[in-house]
Image (cartoon, coloured by chain):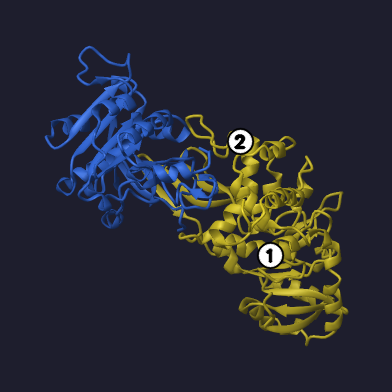
Chain colours: A yellow, B blue
């Protein structure tokens, strides 16, 4: 893990002041917050006051939707007779701060950067990335679905974060990890004090591992090895037997980034070409116009999602397309658990490795 | 503007190739774009009708014939149906060129065998015309083209032009039962006709495109004629949205048709997982 370039302290009153100062100055503040529903669910949304922010619960939606929105305009078109006029969408995005991001959500951003910059730079994605300062909060909210440590991340990791908050005393130790993070501190000096209570921050961090001990032995490299050797295997359709094909796993995923491009008419002559999030678990996702579907059954679609995360993306972009956030497992109505899936595939590879001793004559 | 912003093109001519296949001849509306536009044989583009959406197919005309740009497509879905309704003068969108290309420069001095079925002639025709425009760089040129019936043959004008050339051997065929009384070509399936035509594999490459069933039975014939898998090229297609490697739907295992393809050798295709 990289070292912070600077340390500060922010207490809870200062944090509240920072939120109001940012919001007052026109910066969009995105934070885990209560939804206005009777169940008291918590999700990332835009807030204007610290009173709405909930830092001790896990947001149930993915932060990626603030960078790859469920729907976004790409351009507007208008037809006049045989002519068409195109109007680009204003690419400018006002400054934004994400406060209290889960480290697993923050870590998803630089992972997805890699495909979004693959030879062609996706300006809408990077426009939002550049406009956004991410303040993550070290996470003590791990449950049995979590496995960030199993994919090389950590509940107090700073990947994708400009600032990382670690609970300390009456507030938080502030670790600065980027120029963007330092710029935010410099812009609002009144809300940041000198670092203190660092031993408490240290103790907090030391206590985080216990809730994730189940993930310690996870071997995603073994899962990858198995996937690469078993494109056709009964394990895939077996895994799909309980899958409803609803796509919820991909919707809540911090790294799933598939999309569709569609035209939406607005009246007769005008409309908007939009990019919409799309999900590889849908049967229509790869359906050809002529009727052929290369991923024609749910087994093929689950294989695509698991392979993309643990074999294809590591192969093409040198990163696992999964941060172990566990959200897909919690969202799955059929109880498919990604941690169990990876553990099982890695176990199948371990069985093969045991049967094939290295060294000596075979 | 972002990378999904298309260029505007005007339809300058439309040719009804068959009852359900149309060729559109296109011109960029912005002269600066037209001036700067370049592509290589085999590359594809995203074509759009505003209000209907985008659709992926190859550029069917040869790069040596720019500023001529043509696309040919079969009317199967929402966008291709909308495209098929465009008339001369209408405006459409174009993003591209994307993907890799046929290594035409590397084929210098070699004989070329083009094998196509149905609308599969569109991407092959781009390479044929490209190579015929540079005819003295290559050895023998053989074209084997077949369709279900005489009325399903596309590029009838090109077929006549190729047949008239002394430096091209054109073998055209229709499936049994698809012939007419005045049909002057062969009757039989492409693989059979190819086997009978028996072009030499010595210092040659084969370019194959057509329906999967045709490709399946053509590859063994090429093998028998002595073509190694590295001497055989084809172009794949899969449903795409971005064309740029991001939208996540055209990959076959680790291979992205939009970025690693659409042009592959038969050896590369044989390595692909069975996800096609």
Could you say where residue B228 lies in the image, as x and y percent from the top left? Answer: 34, 42
Return the residue nearer the eye: B265 or A307.
B265
Q: Residue A97 carries which label?
A: none
Q: Where is residue A241 in the image (x, y as percent from the top left)?
A: 72, 35
Instruction: Point out the residue furthest to the front here.
Output: A361
Toward the viewer: B34 or A338?
A338
> Can you see residue A171?
no
Residue B247, x across and y down, in percent? 54, 49
State the image quarter where residue A26 is shown.
Answer: bottom right
**Cβ atoms under marks 1 and 2 closer than 8 Å:** no
Q: Residues within 10 Å of mark 1 (few under 14, many from 20)?
A: many
In depth, the one of A304 and A99 nearer the eye is A304
Q: Is mark 2 on a helix, strand or loop?
A: loop
Which residue, given by chain and number where applicable, does mark 1 sit on? A106
Discs 1 and 2 lie in a common subunit:
yes
Tell me: residue A287, above or below residue A147.
above
Quarter of the image for residue A25 reads bottom right
Tell me the subunit letter for badge 1.
A
Say how many tags the image has. 2
Image position of B165 (left or right of A182): left
Residue B79 left/right relative to B209: right
Q: Which residue lies furthest to the left in this view?
A: B166
Residue A166 at x, y percent in the picture = 80, 75
Can you say whether B80 is above or below A335 in the image? Answer: above
Which numbered tag is attached to residue A283? 2
Going 77% across and 49% down the picture, which residue do you hit? A340
Element carrying mark 1:
helix
Q: From the viewer's perspective, is B52 left or right of A181?
A: left
Residue A176 in sight in this render:
yes
Quadrant showing the N terminus of chain A: bottom right
Residue at mark 1 to residue at mark 2: CA–CA distance:
30 Å
């Amino acid at each position: 893990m990289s070292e912070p370039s600077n340390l500060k302290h922010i207490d809870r009153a200062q944090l509240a002041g920072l939120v109001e100062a940012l919001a007052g100055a026109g910066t969009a503040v995105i934070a885990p917050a209560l939804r206005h529903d009777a169940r008291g669910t918590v999700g990332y949304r835009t807030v204007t006051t610290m009173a709405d922010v909930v830092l001790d619960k896990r947001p149930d939606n993915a932060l990626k939707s603030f960078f790859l929105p469920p729907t976004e305009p790409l351009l507007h078109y208008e037809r006049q007779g045989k002519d068409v006029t195109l109007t680009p969408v204003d690419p400018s995005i006002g400054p934004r701060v994400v406060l209290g991001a889960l480290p697993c959500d923050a870590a998803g951003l630089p992972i997805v950067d890699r495909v979004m910059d693959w030879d062609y730079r996706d300006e809408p994605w990077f426009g939002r990335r550049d406009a956004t300062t991410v303040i993550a909060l070290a996470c003590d909210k791990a449950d049995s679905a979590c496995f960030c440590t199993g994919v090389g991340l950590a509940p107090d990791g700073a990947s994708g974060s400009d600032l990382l908050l670690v609970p300390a005393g009456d507030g938080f130790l502030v670790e600065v990890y980027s120029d963007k993070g330092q710029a935010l501190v410099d812009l609002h000096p009144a809300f940041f004090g000198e670092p203190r209570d660092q031993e408490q921050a240290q103790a907090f961090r030391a206590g985080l591992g216990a809730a994730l001990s189940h993930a310690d032995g996870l071997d995603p490299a073994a899962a990858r090895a198995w996937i690469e050797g078993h494109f056709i295997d009964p394990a895939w359709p077996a895994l799909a037997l309980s899958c409803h094909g609803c796509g919820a796993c991909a919707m809540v995923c911090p790294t799933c980034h598939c999309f569709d491009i569609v035209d939406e008419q607005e009246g007769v002559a005008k409309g908007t070409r939009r990019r919409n999030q799309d999900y590889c678990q849908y049967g229509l996702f790869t359906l050809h116009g002529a009727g052929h579907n290369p991923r024609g059954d749910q087994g093929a679609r689950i294989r695509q999602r698991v392979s993309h995360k643990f074999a294809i993306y590591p192969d093409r972009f040198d990163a696992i397309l999964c941060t172990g956030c566990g959200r897909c497992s919690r969202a799955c109505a059929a109880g498919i658990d990604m941690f169990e899936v990876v553990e099982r595939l890695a176990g199948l590879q371990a069985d093969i490795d045991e049967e094939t001793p290295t060294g000596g004559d075979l | 503007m972002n990378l999904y912003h298309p260029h505007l093109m005007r339809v300058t001519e439309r040719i009804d190739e068959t009852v359900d296949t149309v060729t559109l001849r296109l011109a960029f509306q912005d002269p600066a774009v037209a001036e700067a536009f370049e592509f290589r044989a085999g590359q594809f583009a995203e074509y759009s009708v505003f209000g209907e959406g985008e659709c992926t197919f190859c550029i069917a005309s040869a790069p040596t014939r720019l500023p001529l740009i043509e696309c040919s497509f079969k009317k199967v879905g929402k966008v291709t149906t909308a495209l098929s309704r465009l008339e001369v003068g209408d405006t459409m969108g174009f993003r591209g060129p994307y993907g890799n290309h046929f290594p035409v420069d590397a084929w210098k001095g070699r004989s070329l065998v083009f094998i196509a079925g149905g609308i599969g002639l569109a991407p092959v025709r781009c390479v044929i015309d490209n190579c015929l425009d540079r005819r003295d760089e290559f050895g023998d040129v053989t074209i084997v083209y077949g369709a279900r019936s005489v009325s399903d043959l596309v590029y009838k004008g090109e077929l006549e032009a190729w047949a008239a050339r002394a430096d091209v051997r054109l073998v055209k065929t229709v499936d049994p039962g698809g012939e007419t009384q005045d049909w002057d070509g062969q009757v039989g399936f492409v693989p059979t006709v190819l086997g009978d035509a028996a072009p030499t594999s010595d210092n040659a490459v084969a370019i194959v495109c057509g329906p999967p069933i045709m490709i399946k039975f053509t590859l063994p014939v090429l093998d028998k004629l002595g073509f190694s898998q590295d001497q055989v090229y084809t172009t794949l297609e899969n449903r795409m949205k971005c064309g740029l490697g991001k939208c996540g739907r055209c990959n076959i295992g680790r291979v992205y048709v939009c970025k690693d393809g659409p042009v592959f050798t038969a050896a590369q295709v044989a390595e692909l997982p069975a996800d096609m």
